[in-house]
Image (cartoon, rainbow, N blue to C red):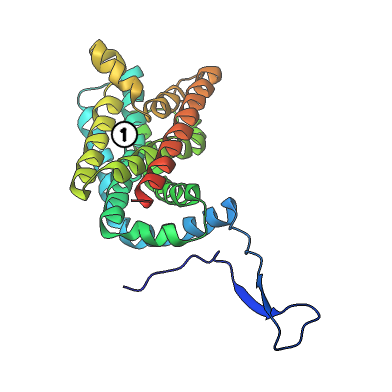
Amino acid sequence: MTSIIPARTAATRTRPAPGASGTGPACTVTAPLAPRARLLPSLAAIYRAQLSRARVARIPLLFVATFQSVGIMILMRGVVDGGAEARAVVAGSSVLVVAFVALNLLAQYFGQLRASGGLDHYATLPVPPAAVVLGAAAAYASFTVPGTVFTAITGSVLFQLPMTHLWVLVAVIPLSGAALAGLGAALGLLAPRPELATLLGQLGMSAALLLGVLPAERLPQPVGWARDLLPSTYGVEALARSFDARPDWGIIAFFLAICAAVGVLSLAVATWAYRRAAVR
């Protein structure tokens, strides 16, 4: 098997020692190493490559994710009339699109990448490990934007909720996407087999469905504690409170800050998992 040698290998050449004739002793000169690729350019390159790949392969799955969320809202419309419960259903269904793509599909992607040896290719590139994880996570999170926006608008119409503050999705989508994508990447990289990565991704999406769409006040206390551990919960809470006639922006900013902190933590764990899987 032909191996791929990293681009940062030092080049050496020999030349005669200064002042010596061509037949004299030679000294070895080591050429300087090329600078290592920086984080932001590497991140941008991987993001573009992953987004281009996802655009072709994931459009049918995005349609399924959006159709699933809209179907859940239609079913809940016969049970929930309005108020806080309607806001929770719409917000949870909207963020569920992010969970389906960023958590479920990313867990499957990294699980298959590890099993097929695709991580060996990334390990030979002179790019920071964080760029690989962040680039893939950002691409999958970006891919959820159309479905999430469509679901939120459709839910607002179904439950007659105000759409004045739907611009909150500008913060909810990337922050929830980062948290869920980091979790999905970590599950895929830590799972010993791709089948187990797929199972974990499906379980994570099911948790986002059951704990995110159902109103929090109707959940038993132990289940409510599990809901607090789910990364997407805080994005759901921020979006749900934006449907109020007079939103409490302090509380919304608080939930978004927690979502951002969880996103940083989950992406850090995913980067560690990538380093661990790449050296094995």
Q: Left or right: where does residue 205 sit relative to residue 84?
A: left
Which residue shows up at 23% across the image and 34% down it? 206
Which residue shows up at 34% across the image and 27% down it? 230
Residue 170 x/y as whole percent: 51, 38
Q: Quadrant of residue 201?
A: top left
Badge 1 element: helix
Q: Nearer the viewer, residue 214 or 117?
A: 117
Residue identifier under label 1:
93
Q: Quadrant of the N terminus?
A: bottom left
Q: Nearer the viewer, residue 90 or 260?
A: 260
Q: What's the residue type where badge 1 is placed?
A: Ser
In this rendering, is residue 40 above or below 31?
Answer: above
Q: Nearer the viewer, residue 233 or 135?
A: 135
In this rendering, is residue 218 above or below 33?
Answer: above
Q: Left or right: where does residue 115 sit relative to residue 27?
A: left
Q: Quadrant of residue 19?
A: bottom right
Which residue shows up at 35% across the image and 74% down it? 2
Q: Left or right: where does residue 82 sit relative to residue 243?
A: left
Residue 241 x/y as whole percent: 44, 22
Residue 107 x/y as whole percent: 30, 45
